[in-house]
Amino acid sequence: MSGNAPGALLRDAWAALQRGQPAQARVACEAAVHQAPESFDGWRLLAVARQALGDAAGCRDALAQAHGLRPHDGATALDLGSLLLQAGDADNALPVLQVALDALPAEPRAAFRYGTAAFMVGDHTRAVHGFAAATQRDPQWVEAWNNLAASHGQLQEYPQAIAAARQAQQLRPQSASTHQALAALLSNRFDRQELLEGLGCAEAALRLEPNLAQAHRTAAVILRRLGEPHRAERHARRAVEIAPLDPDTIEVLGEQLLASGQTDAAVKVYADAAAGGVATPAMRRQHGIAQLLNRQPEAAEATLRDSLRAAPDDQRAIAHLGVALAASQRLDVAASLIGLHRHVHAVRLPTPAEFPDDAAFHAALATDIRQHSQQRWEPVGLAARNAFLSGDLLADRSAAIIGFEQALRGAIDAFIARCQAAGDDAGSDVFLRNVPQRYRLHVWATQAAETGYIDTHIHEESWLSGAYYVELPPAIRADDPTHAGWIEFGRPYAHLPAWPEDALRRICPQVGDLLLFPSYLFHRTLPYHGSGERISISFDLAAA
């Protein structure tokens, strides 16, 4: 070595690296940082030497020392965050990559890796921020557009997700994966034209790559929603032939068989998958639902309880477990499990200060709903019948909608606080044990005239749901023995074992009331006859 001073040692280390001698460089760097532990350059060069020797852990340690000395250095943060990410430590990578994102405003890799870390920890809002920045810094980066689409999709922000997927498709039109990514997003839509476009994208992917299982699976989902069961089943079976161990693919085939009334075949599909080692919580839940439809309520109960042990917040599993218990002649146990008489609450929302009284507020809110920019008639795949549904109600920022949102959030926050205060009672309660710490909200409106109604459904992707009543027709009355226009809880889908009529819960809506209830509760609105409209606002609240 040319000398023992730290600077001389680092010059020797750099020269050794240039000669392709990383082991000699490491020795020199280690000597330098031993003498001068505050040497930022020493730790950085040591990281390079250790990386060249394949010592990933040692490289991370050296970069961590350098990062501690200069916590705002963007290049160091990018290198350290990238190594943490490669090691699967997204939690610790995320704040480090935040530094890189901010300190390197022209570097797309910093934004992309920040987005990746955020996606891995389940923070999809920050993932959107990262991947959006990556696409701004490098508009030709297809993977950044794809990941931006996936992040928006996780937030159920489908218009933004679809727009990002279209960019990826345009940049790489000969890639089956870009067509499939767009098809998968469009499969979540409710407009028939969008579903047909999604089917076209899936078919384009299959022309480019005929054995792409995901594209067959997506085609099956879309065709089922379009009412073409035979074509859907063909695609679903082909997907399973190609990817026999993929849980999502098996689930799509099972769902299609159930939708076609082939319950024996569906039970066998799920049983064979379990025997083959494919046993995710969702697969167990679907197996239980298939058993229930196949008139095996006791077996269904056991399977659904097993799935809930692994995924205690699975709304479909909870809903169908209640039906299985009732079908086994244990109605009291079923009603207690789902909290049919315990977890439906009515809350009176205050009138926003911008309005003189309730009547003025509700009149303005009803007008905003009728004129909403995302109003759609009977969207495909949703429960609305002879009714309009808005998309995201909060997208239109009128005074009435903003005032409603503020009142709604206040009521929700107060309700969650009460649920969190339940303490020891929460453990055995399938609703209270899943109270989210943070949440995201989706709000939409329904406008129905005579004979319009919302059919039986649950809200599978959320924890809490609700309905707020804006305008009601004269036919909806508390003294009506036929319950016309009321909301009903407890009745399962028609193809499931029936819930006794005298055990259903029906509530007469009142303008200004907000009903809060678990998302797993089967519910519907009843049709009415007469003049006037039934205008209501619904929401889903899911853990964020």
Image (cartoon, helix red, strand yellow):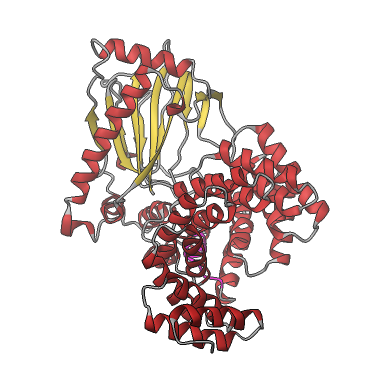
In terms of image quadrants, where is residue 13?
bottom right
Of residue 136 and residue 118, the one placed in the foreground of this image is: 136
Of residue 209 and residue 217, the one placed in the foreground of this image is: 209
Describe residue 221's horizontal placement relative to residue 4 as left or right: right
**Residue 473 in sight from this viewpoint:** no
- 262 to 455, vertically: above or below: below
Of residue 231 and residue 222, the one placed in the foreground of this image is: 222
**Residue 530 in sight from this viewpoint:** yes
Tag count in the figure? 0
Q: Position of residue 437 (x, y in %)?
A: 29, 51
Looking at this rendering, what residue extends furthest in the front direction? 3
Residue lying at 35% horizontally and 17% vertically, measured from the top left: 399
Does the stretch in magenta take in 383? no
Does the stretch in magenta take in 284? yes
In terms of image quadrants, where is residue 245?
bottom right
In terms of image quadrants, where is residue 471?
top left
Q: Which residues are magenta?
A: 278-287
Q: Position of residue 293 (x, y in %)?
A: 51, 55
- 362 to 70, vertically: above or below: above
Q: Quadrant of the N terminus?
A: bottom right
What main secondary structure does the magenta stretch of the protein show?
A: helix
Of residue 214 and residue 95, the one placed in the foreground of this image is: 95
Q: Position of residue 237 (x, y in %)?
A: 71, 60
Residue lying at 59% horizontally and 76% vertically, measured from the top left: 276
Q: Position of residue 503 (x, y in %)?
A: 30, 42
